[in-house]
């Protein structure tokens, strides 16, 4: 029987490598997989049985001998039971993450055995415009944060006249509390390659780049190894899967700047320059990498596409609410009892995610605030826990879904300090191109310091609001433009912390 131990960096950080080595020494046939995303159970060891995989976790190195003696290697030792039957798993709808934690990420055979390449084969049998049509019909929107309809973006690139076009995957995942891009790349890299290849066929590109942040060494190594394996299999290169399509992929590594997750900065960085924002228009779909029409999509957007082509746009569009269709991969982090990956249809409420999936805080104290959508997202109080995860509902509440990261805070959080942190972060990470952001962020820190010190408090609160309006309206990109969101939401929902 096979024993599965994650090689995901979250699992490795708590000892998965040692556990895998010990299990191997005890005679187990160990297969390294991605993580199921139940981070509080890592290292989670799974054992193949006739009924499915049974789980044990968290397994510390010192637990291994006892568990093996109790029958772990044939799945008879008492443990968590069938992993797929755990409530956390059963309540999810894993489409994009269906294979993460299941397959050996670097085995092309495993990929195909678990339904991989079905989407690519379906796409290659269609003319490009029909592939774009399917993505449009599915309702898929950009999972990087902005939620722009992916099909419309692809249509723009398809319609642009150029001999040279590119597909670029944004894997810079800089948002605090987000890790889904990393887990997908470490756990199921062939699905991302498949999604990018479908995009290439759909828009007429021959070359693609994956821009990965340097903080993700495991993801970088996994993607590089998967690309090499895909080339060897004829899944990349000339005549992909025997079709007319030629497409090849390259990994490029960032150097630690948050702003390089902004698409035009990322393109500058890919071209070998300092990551600084370009004014839009022109949008990258018309003039992107090296001035050519370029699809720039987040990891999760591209990785959703194979499922859509394999199972049909209608099946994807059936899930979700309003204009937020399909599933999204939410990430629970911060002070939360059960952190990890929740892939489910849009429409799940904030309370369901934080309380039902997350189990409240890790500290056991009451939840006071959650920040949704990264460091530029709003802080929401518990009174907003009925809010459904839906791009429009969040926008109406002065918040954003963003990349789906949810960071939980308990009642010891100082929200004025969190508002200060938003400006501090912006001052640190600003690319410096425009004044509202470059100067505004520094003035914001100073103004909040005055408010916290009780200096002309009312006057400074008005000034703070003015500054927020100026940054929202006058910044060139979302960095300066969205920094006011956490600040304003903190002032609005947690006014007592500013008194
Ligand atoms: P945006 O609204 O300017 O653009 C969204 C996308 O649509 C871009 O790719 C843009 O080029 C494309 N687009 C716009 N009009 C188009 C058209 N007519 N045809 C084809 N394509 C078109 O938003 P932006 O500045 O790209 O992203 C802001 C978002 O980024 C924020 O809402 C935030 O949630 C998110 N974000 C994500 C982070 C992460 O780590 N994933 C970090 C920071 C921010
Ligand atoms: Fe650069 Fe900030 Fe202006 Fe964006 S808002 S272009 S990060 S200075």
Image (tube, helix red, strand yellow):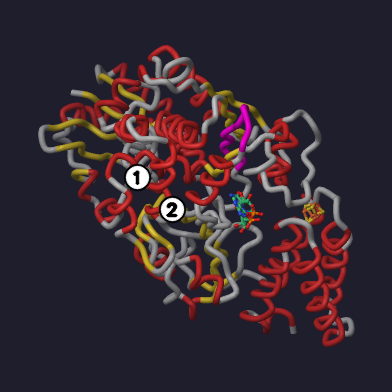
Q: Which residues are magenta?
A: 161-172
235 to 44, vertically: above or below: above
Looking at the figure, which quarter contains the C terminus?
Answer: bottom right
Looking at the figure, which quarter contains the N terminus?
Answer: top left
Q: Is residue 459 magenta?
A: no
Mark 2 nearby-residue class (10 Å; few <14, some 14–19, many ≥20):
many
Which residue is at a point 87% across and 68% down the rendered structure image? 446
Question: Within 8 Å of ligand 1, the CB of disc 1?
Answer: no
User: Mark 1 = which residue?
Assistant: 308
Which residue is at a point 29% across and 32% down the rendered structure image? 118
Mark 1 nearby-residue class (10 Å; few <14, some 14–19, many ≥20):
many
- Find residue 437 and report its horizontal and vertical position in percent: 82, 59
Disc 2 vs disc 1: Cβ atoms closer than 8 Å? yes
Nearer-N-terminus badge (2/1): 2
Which residue is at a point 88% across and 59% down the rendered structure image? 435
Q: Secondary structure at mark 1?
A: helix
Observer-nearest residue: 303 or 13? 303
User: Mark 2 = which residue?
Assistant: 140
Instruction: Single out the residue that lies furthest toward the bottom.
Output: 458
Res. 15 visible in picture: no
Quadrant in the rendering for residue 471 = bottom right
Observer-nearest residue: 134 or 302? 134
491 to 353, vertically: above or below: below
Ligand 2, seen in the image, is in the quarter at bottom right
The answer for how far apart the CA atoms under marks 2 and 1 are is: 9 Å
Q: Is residue 164 magenta?
A: yes
């Amino acid at each position: 029987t096979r024993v599965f131990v994650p090689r995901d960096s979250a699992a490795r950080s708590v000892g998965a490598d040692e556990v895998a080595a010990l299990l191997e020494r005890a005679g187990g046939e160990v297969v390294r997989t991605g993580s199921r995303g139940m981070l509080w159970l890592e290292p989670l060891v799974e054992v193949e049985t006739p009924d499915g995989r049974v789980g044990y976790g968290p397994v510390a190195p010192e637990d291994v001998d006892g568990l093996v003696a109790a029958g772990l290697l044939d799945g008879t030792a008492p443990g968590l039971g069938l992993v797929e039957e755990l409530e956390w798993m059963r309540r999810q709808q894993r489409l994009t993450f269906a294979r993460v934690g299941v397959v050996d990420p670097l085995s092309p055979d495993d990929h195909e055995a678990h339904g991989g390449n079905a989407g690519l084969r379906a796409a290659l049998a269609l003319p490009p415009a029909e592939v774009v049509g399917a993505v449009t019909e599915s309702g898929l929107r950009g999972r990087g944060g902005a939620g722009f309809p992916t099909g419309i973006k692809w249509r723009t690139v398809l319609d642009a006249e150029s001999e040279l076009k590119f597909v670029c995957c944004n894997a810079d995942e800089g948002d605090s509390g987000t890790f889904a891009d990393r887990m997908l790349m470490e756990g199921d890299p062939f699905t991302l390659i498949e999604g990018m290849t479908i995009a290439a066929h759909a828009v007429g590109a021959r070359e693609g780049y994956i821009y990965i942040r340097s903080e993700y060494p495991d993801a970088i190594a996994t993607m590089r190894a998967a690309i090499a394996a895909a080339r060897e299999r004829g899944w990349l290169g000339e005549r992909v899967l025997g079709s007319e399509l030629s497409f090849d992929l390259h990994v490029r590594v960032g150097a630690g700047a948050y702003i390089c997750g902004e698409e035009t900065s990322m393109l500058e960085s890919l071209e070998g320059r300092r990551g600084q924002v370009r004014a839009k228009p022109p949008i990258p779909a018309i003039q992107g990498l090296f001035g050519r029409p370029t699809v720039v999509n987040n990891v999760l957007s591209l990785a959703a596409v194979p499922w859509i082509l394999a199972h049909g746009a209608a099946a994807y569009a059936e899930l979700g609410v309003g204009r937020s269709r399909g599933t999204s991969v939410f990430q629970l982090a911060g002070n939360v009892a059960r952190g990890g990956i929740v892939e489910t249809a849009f429409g799940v409420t904030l309370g369901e995610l934080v309380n039902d999936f997350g189990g409240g805080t890790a500290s056991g104290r009451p939840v006071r605030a959650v920040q949704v959508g990264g460091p530029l997202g709003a802080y929401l109080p518990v009174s907003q826990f009925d809010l459904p995860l839906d791009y429009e509902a969040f926008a109406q509440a002065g918040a954003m879904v963003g990349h789906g990261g949810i960071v939980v805070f308990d009642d010891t959080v100082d929200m004025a300090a969190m508002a200060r942190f938003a400006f501090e972060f912006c001052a640190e990470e600003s690319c410096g191109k425009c004044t509202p952001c470059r100067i505004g962020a520094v003035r914001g820190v100073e103004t909040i310091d005055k408010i916290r010190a009780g200096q002309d408090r009312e006057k400074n609160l008005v000034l703070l609001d003015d500054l927020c309006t100026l940054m929202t309206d006058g910044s060139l990109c979302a960095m300066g433009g969205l920094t006011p969101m956490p600040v304003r939401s903190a002032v609005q929902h947690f006014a007592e912390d500013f008194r």
